[in-house]
């Protein structure tokens, strides 16, 4: 069921139509749907750009965001619309220029971004579950949209974040900023090829292009006084594939402490190749109830990958980094990353 809301969170009406919608870890998700122009609810006030929207499902997470983007009036007598998840709201606001944002943690820095976004006109984003750990953070605000700055802060700090929909006691919609050191939980349900998941497209890609095990981090500043930090070499990666050196620019980092933390977080991710797995989840048993961004699940496959003994197959753990729900087929396309603790 789709519920439409005014920008102040008051509900307008509900409609029923099929959607395709995505949840993406640390990024905005997208929703597309069509609505018949012969329906009495096909009115401008309901589908106005900027209206808020939620989509509910019995077992999948509540999807919520804002209608934004092109509207296509199709020859089949339908109106095609696009909505984006709550994170997209930050793209409606620009940051100040030539200002350094400092905070005691990444969570506090992201909350400062949200506070800036709410100030000129309330976007209804409230404090949710915000992890306050980690080191002091800073980011140089330069007039870019606040969504771009939020993504940069979270990526550099190595934290997960989201802006999620909530419904209050009066059935009004609002959003919450949530920040975690790592989103999701370890779950026991196994994703098993030919049982509750099937192959999809390029089912497995192993990405070696960005692997670095000897990383030099470069902060902001002129050539003479630009701060640098050399992270310790990842010896496990070096022993497996040899020494691979690299540098990474951390825009907005003028302090040594922030630069050090960001460089260490980056090499932890980049020292090993990424194994990205694409699957289609079937509505079997409790499968849909376990599909939450960041969750870590056992995974078994018989037709692709290599096992430790060199045979074809996979017996590992995966972390869910993307979900794409298709109402028409009642399936969920999964983008997973092999998880090694």
Image (cartoon, grey):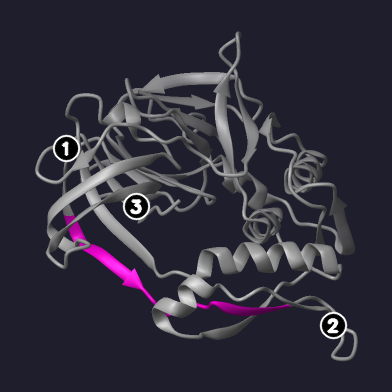
**Residue 214, image quadrant:** bottom right
Q: Position of residue 170 (x, y in %)?
A: 60, 9
- Which numbered disc flags the more N-terminal residue, 2 or 3? 2
| Horizontal side of residue 317 vs 12, given as left or right | left
Question: For the point 17% across and 64% down, which residue is it?
Answer: 309
Element under disc 2: loop
The residue that label 1 is drawn on is: 196
Q: Position of residue 172 (x, y in %)?
A: 59, 17
Which numbered circle lies on residue 90?
A: none
Question: For the point 57% across and 86% down, which residue is it?
Answer: 245
| Horizontal side of residue 309 vs 291, given as left or right | left
* Circles 2, 3 touching at the beta carbon (< 8 Å): no
Question: For the point 80% across and 68% down, which residue is it?
Answer: 253
The residue that label 2 is drawn on is: 226
Crowdedness near tag 1: few (<14), some (14–19) or many (≥20) residues, C-alpha within 10 Å? some
Question: For the point 25% across and 35% down, which residue is it?
Answer: 327
Q: Position of residue 98 (x, y in %)?
A: 89, 67
Q: Indicate whether residue 204 is drawn in magenta.
A: yes
- Which numbered disc flags the more N-terminal residue, 1 or 3? 1
* Circles 2, 1 touching at the beta carbon (< 8 Å): no
Element under disc 3: strand
Q: Nearer the viewer, residue 330 or 209?
A: 209
Q: In the current view of this chain or complex, which residue is farthest to the top?
A: 169
Task: State how far apart marks 1 and 3 are (Cα).
Answer: 15 Å
Q: Indicate whether residue 31 is drawn in magenta.
A: no
> In the image, which residues are magenta?
200-217
* Circles 1, 3 touching at the beta carbon (< 8 Å): no
- Which numbered disc flags the more N-terminal residue, 2 or 1? 1
Task: State how far apart marks 2 and 3 are (Cα).
Answer: 37 Å
């Amino acid at each position: 069921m789709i519920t439409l809301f005014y920008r102040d969170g008051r509900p307008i009406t509900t409609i029923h139509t099929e959607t395709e919608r995505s949840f993406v870890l640390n990024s905005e998700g997208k929703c597309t749907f069509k609505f018949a122009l012969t329906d009495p609810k096909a009115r401008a006030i309901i589908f106005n750009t900027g209206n808020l929207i939620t989509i509910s499902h019995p077992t999948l997470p509540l999807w919520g965001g804002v209608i934004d983007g092109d509207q296509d009036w199709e020859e089949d007598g339908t109106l095609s619309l696009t909505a984006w998840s709550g994170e997209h709201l930050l793209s409606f606001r620009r940051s100040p220029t030539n200002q350094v944002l400092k905070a005691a943690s990444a969570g506090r820095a992201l909350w400062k971004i949200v506070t800036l976004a709410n100030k000129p006109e309330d976007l209804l984003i409230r404090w949710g579950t915000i992890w306050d750990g980690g080191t002091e953070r800073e980011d140089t605000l330069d007039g870019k949209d606040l969504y771009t700055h939020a993504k940069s802060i979270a990526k550099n700090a190595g934290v997960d974040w989201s802006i999620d929909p909530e419904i209050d006691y009066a059935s009004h919609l609002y959003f919450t900023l949530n920040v975690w050191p790592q989103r999701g939980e370890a779950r026991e349900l196994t994703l098993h090829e030919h049982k509750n998941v099937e192959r999809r497209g390029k089912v497995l890609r192993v990405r070696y292009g960005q692997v670095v095990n000897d990383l030099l981090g470069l902060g902001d500043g002129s050539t003479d006084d630009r701060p640098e930090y050399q992270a310790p070499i990842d010896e496990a990666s070096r022993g497996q594939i040899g020494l691979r050196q690299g540098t990474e620019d951390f825009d907005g980092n003028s302090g040594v402490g922030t630069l050090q933390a960001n460089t260490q977080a980056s090499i932890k991710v980049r020292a090993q190749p990424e194994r990205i797995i694409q699957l289609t989840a079937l509505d079997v048993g409790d499968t849909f109830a376990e599909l939450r961004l960041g969750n870590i699940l056992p995974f078994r496959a018989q037709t692709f990958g290599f096992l430790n003994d060199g045979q074809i197959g996979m017996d590992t753990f995966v972390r869910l980094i993307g979900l794409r729900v298709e109402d028409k087929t009642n399936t969920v396309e999964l983008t997973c990353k092999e998880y090694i603790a």
